[in-house]
Amino acid sequence: MSGEAVKVAVRVRPFNQREIDRQSKLVIKMDGKMTMIYNPETPNEDPKKFSFDYSYWSHDGFDARGDGTTDPKPGSNYASQRMVFENLGQGVLNNAFEGYNCSLFAYGQTGSGKSYSMIGYGANKGIVPTTCDELFKTMATNDDPNKRYEVMFSMLEIYNEQVRDLLSKDNPKGGLNVRQNPKLGMFYVEGLKKVPVGSYSEIEKRMEQGTQSRTVASTNMNATSSRAHTVVTIIFDQIIKTDNGETKKSSTMNLVDLAGSERADSTGATGDRLKEGANINKSLSALGNVISALADLSMGKKKVMVPYRDSVLTKLLQNALGGNSKTIMIAALSPADINYDETLGTLRYADRAKKIQNKAVINESPLDKLIRELKEENEKLKRAMESGGMVIKQEAGMSSEDLERMRKQMEEEIRAQLMANQAMLEESETTQNWDQKLAAAQKETHSLDKDVSDATRKKNEIYLINLNEDPMLSGVIVHFIKDGETSIGRKDAQPMPDICLNGLSIQKVHAVLTCKKNVVELEPMSGSGPKTKVNGVPLTSKKKLTHKDRLLFGSNHLYVFLNPKNPEKSEDLPDEITWEFAQKEIAQVKGFATATGAGMSKDQLIAQEQVLEILPMVSEVNAISEELNKQKSFDVVLISAAAQENTYGAANNTTVTVKMKNLLNGNTWLWERGKFMNRRYLIQDMYQRFLDGDDLSKVTKEQDPFWEPTEDTLIGSANVFLQSLSYALDFEDKIMFTDYKGQEEGYIVIHVTPCQKDGKALEEDAFVDEPHELLGKPYHFKVTVKNGEVYKQRFSKGIQVKYRVYKDDSFTETKLVKNTLKPEFKHNKVFTFSKITKEHLEFFEGGCITFMVYGTQEDTVPDPKLLKFTTRELRQMDQGSVPTSAAVTRRNTHFALETASDQSHLKTEVLLLQRKYERLAAKERRMQDICKEWDAKPEGEKQYEPFYRAVSAVAHSSGTRLKTRVHLLNQIMKAEKYLQEKRRQSNAEESQGQVQSKNGRVVRSAEGQRKDGSSACVLQ
Ligand SMILES: Nc1ncnc2c1ncn2[C@@H]1O[C@H](COP(=O)(O)OP(=O)(O)O)[C@@H](O)[C@H]1O
Ligand SMILES: [Mg+2]
C-alpha cells in the first residue's frame, strides 16, 4: 500500500467591484501548473513561484452566457466551474464509486472564493452540488440488479469549537459532542443527523436548509460566518449481493468550506489582557499545525506528533488529512495587490499541504462480518458497563472526587460508544428498511420551507429579503408581505408576531408593516425608532417604503424591501443591493466619509474598509452593553497618521481604533482594532451565556471583557521638529498639543538644546554652517520639558509627558504632576550620539520627537445619581452632551490636525533661520567694527595684513560666509511668504465652506470636507 500525496489546486478569482473602484493591481500570474505572485512594493523583482497540481486562472478571459455561467474566451486559459469540477469533482466521484473515502477542502481568506468553488453562486454551481448531481446521474445508469445504493447527507458547522447540526432544529447548549470510536480510532459527531436522500434535488433542499440555519444563527448573534467552518458529509454506500451474502462498499465524502484564513484578528488579541478570544480560530490554527506536522512526516522527519486532538476540526478531518482518504485541497486566491500578504500566506499553506501523503484503502467488507463484529464489540462494552466501568488506577495526589469524576467520564464514554455502535448496527441490519427510512426522510425534506426558491412568488408579491456580510448567506431568508398588517418582533410577544426576529435590540413588538393596495408603510413600535433604520436613517414615524429600500431592525437584521408591483425605486440605486452598500449608507449617515476610488491612498482605503467592517460590530457591542447593563459605551475612532506618535523609521497608517468609555466616571480606553475584535468575541460569548440562562453575577471583573483596569489616557500629542539640531542651534517653544481629532487640548514648553556631555551649554561658536560638518563627531543634546497647561478639568488628577528619541525602544517619562492643570515638569535629559552618522542627520532634518501628554484616570466612585440610570439612558445622556452632532464635528478635524503640524514645522524653520540670522548679524557688526577701527587709524598705521587677518578670522570663525547670509535671508523671505500664503488660503477656505453650528461654533460644511475620508472621527 503506497501513499498518495494530497492534491492541491489554487484558483484566482476576478476583481470584485471594490477592487475595481480602487484600481487594484493584479499580483498573480499563472503559467501551466505554475502560480506566481508579485510583491506590489517591489514590482520589478522576480515573483515568488509555486507549482501545484492545478493552477486555475479564473480572473479574466471569459464570456458570460445568458444563464450567468461562464465560458473561456477563445485562446484564454480561463477555468470555469465546469472545468474545475471535471478535474477535481469527477475524481472524487470516481473514487467514491470505488469505495474510497474522499475529502475536499477549501482554504483562503474571506472573500477569496472558497464558497464560490465549493458551493457556487446561482447558475455557477460549485463542486459540491455538481458532484452530488453527477453522483445521482451515475447511480441512475446502474442496471445491475445485485447492486443498490444508499446515500446519506449531513451538514454541520464548527464555530468557536462548537459543533452545530445544520439540519436539526434543536442543537444542545454548547454544541454536539465529538467522540472517538475506540475501535476505528476515528472521531465522529455524536447524534449528528444523517438524512437519507434519494435524489439530487433532495440534497439541494437540504443544503438550502443548512444555509438557512447558518444565516439565522449568524443574524441573531451577528456571528461572523467567515469564522465558521462548514462541513458537508455524504455517505455513499453500495450494497452488492454476492454468492456469499452481501458486501458493503462505503465511501465517506467530506466537503469542507473552511473559515477565512486571515490572521489580522487573532494577532490583535495577543496584546490583550484576555487572550482567550484568539480561540476563535483555534480550529484553523490547529489545522495549520497538523498540516505542518504531516508535511514534516512525509519529508522523512521522525518523531513528529501530529496534534489532531487540538481542535474539533482536526479531529473530524483526521482521516482526510493523515489517513484513509483521497484528499484534495483548493486554495482560493485574491488577485489584488492589497491582499498580497494574505495571498502569499495561502500559497505557502497550499505548498505545505501538497507534501502530505495519505493511504486510502477501499472500504469494503461483507455485511455479515461487519454486523458480527459490531455485535461482539457491543457485548464487550455492555460487560464493561455492568462491571462498573473500567478499573482506574488511583494515582498519587488523586482525590476520591477526582477518581469518581474520571469513573463517571469513562462510563459516559462507554455509553456513547455503545449507542454509536448500536446505531451503526441498525443501519447495517436494516438495509431492508432503507426504502422506508428514505421515504420518511423524503417526506420531511419536501416539507421544508419553500420561500427562498419560490421564484414565481418573488415576481408577483411584495417581500423582504435578507442581506448578510457573507454573500453566501444573503438572499436566504424571505418574508412575503400580505395585505393588511404584518408585525415584526420577538417570539415571546403575545400574540406571536408574523415575522419573528431574535437577538439584540429587538423589541417584543418592534415594528409593523401595513400593506394597502400595494403600498407598504413601516411604523416603529414601543420606542424602537432608533433601532429601526430605513436606508441608514433612524425611523422616527410611519414611513412609506419604496422598492429596494434597506431596512435594519435591531443591530443585525438587515433586509431589502422589494415591491415588484410598484418597482419605482427612489434614487440612483445599483441593480443589486449588497450588504456592503447598505453598510456604507449606515456609515455615511453616521458621518463617516465613504468615498471610493481615485485620490485615496491604500492606507486610507484599508482604514475605510475596516471602518465599514467594525461599525456594525460596535453597534452590536453597544447593544449588548445596554442589555447587560454594563455602563460602557463604544465608539469607532479613526486616528490619522499625523495624530500618531512619530517613531523614526516607522511609517504611520491611519488606524481604526475603538474607544470604550465608562459612562459613570468618564474614564476612557482606546483599543486597537484587533483587541476590540477579540473583546467583541468574548462579549458575544458572555451574551450567549446570558441568553442560555447562566448566572453572570459569578463572573469576576478580571474575567469580564467589559472591564479594564484604569490606565492613563492620552490627552494629546505634539511634534517637535529637529532641524535646529543639525546646525547645533537650540530650539525653544511653547507648543500646542492636539488630541486625535486635532482639537487643541493644551500646550507644553519644550527646549531642545545642543550641549556638552554633562548638559552644560555649548561655546558660542559651536554653531555650524553645514550639517555635514557634524559628521563623525560626538553630539549631545538636552531635551527639556519645562511646564505646560491642560485645558480640561477632568485631567487635573495627574499629568505626565512621555516621548521617545530616535530609535529608543522605551519611552522617556517626565514625573507625574498631580492635582493641577498647569504642571511644572522641570524635566530634562541629555541624549548622546557618540558619532554622528548620515542617518542621525536625516533624523535631525526630517524626523521629530512626539511628546505625548497623558492624564491619570482613577476608578472614582460614581455619582450615586448616575447609578439610577440604565446603560441605555446613560448612553443617550452621553451622546446628548456632545455639543454639535458628532457627524459635523468630525468633518473638520483632519484638516486642523495637518495645519497644526505644518505650522509647528514652519515655526521651527523660522526660528532656526532667526538664530542663524542673529549670529550673522553679530558677525557683521564685528566686521563693521573692525572696518571702523581701520578707518579711524592714521594713514601710516593702516597695515593691510593684520586687518585682513582680523576680518577673515571673523568671517570664517564658524565657517560662515557672507554668501550664506544672503542665502539665509532669502530663505527667511520665502518662508514668510509661504506662511502668509498659507494663512491667506486657510482664511479663504474657511469663509467658503462654513456653516454656523447650533452653539455658534464655526464648523466646516460637507462641501468643505476633505474627500480622502481620513478625517479623525467619533461615532456616537
Ligand atoms: N472564480 C470566481 N469567479 C467569479 N466570481 C467569484 C469567483 N470566486 C469568487 N467570486 C465572487 O467573490 C465573492 C466572494 O467569494 P466567496 O466564494 O463568497 O468567498 P469566501 O467563501 O472565500 O469568503 C463572491 O461574490 C463570489 O461570487
Ligand atoms: Mg464563504
Image: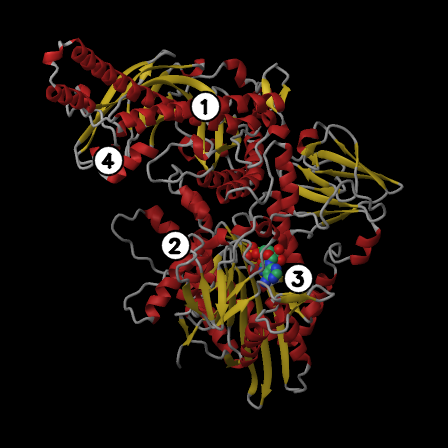
> Could you tell me the amino acid type at mark 4?
His
Q: Secondary structure at mark 4?
A: helix
Comes first in the chain, label 4 or label 3: 3
- Closer to the chain start, of discs 1 and 4, is 4
Task: Give whichever of discs 4 and 2 has the lower sequence position.
Answer: 2
Q: CA distance from mark 4 to mark 2?
A: 80 Å
Cα–Cα gap, marks 3 and 2: 40 Å
Q: Which residue is mark 3?
A: 206
Residue underneath mark 2 = 407
Of the residues shown, which amino acid type is indicated by label 1? Lys
Residue 881 vertical position relative to residue 847 in the rendered view, above or below: above
Which of the colour schemes (rainbow, by chain, secondary structure, one colour) is used? secondary structure
Residue contact at pointers 2 and 1, CB within 8 angstroms: no
Tell me, yes or no, whether the two marked residues, 3 and 1, touch with CB atoms within 8 Å.
no
Q: Earlier in the sequence, mark 3 or mark 2?
A: 3
Which kind of residue does numbered mark 2 sit on? Arg
Residue 265 appears at what percent x and percent y? 46, 45
- The type of residue carrying mark 3 is Arg
Q: Secondary structure at mark 1?
A: helix
Of badges 1 and 4, nearer the viewer stands 1
Nearer the viewer's eye, disc 3 or disc 1?
A: 1
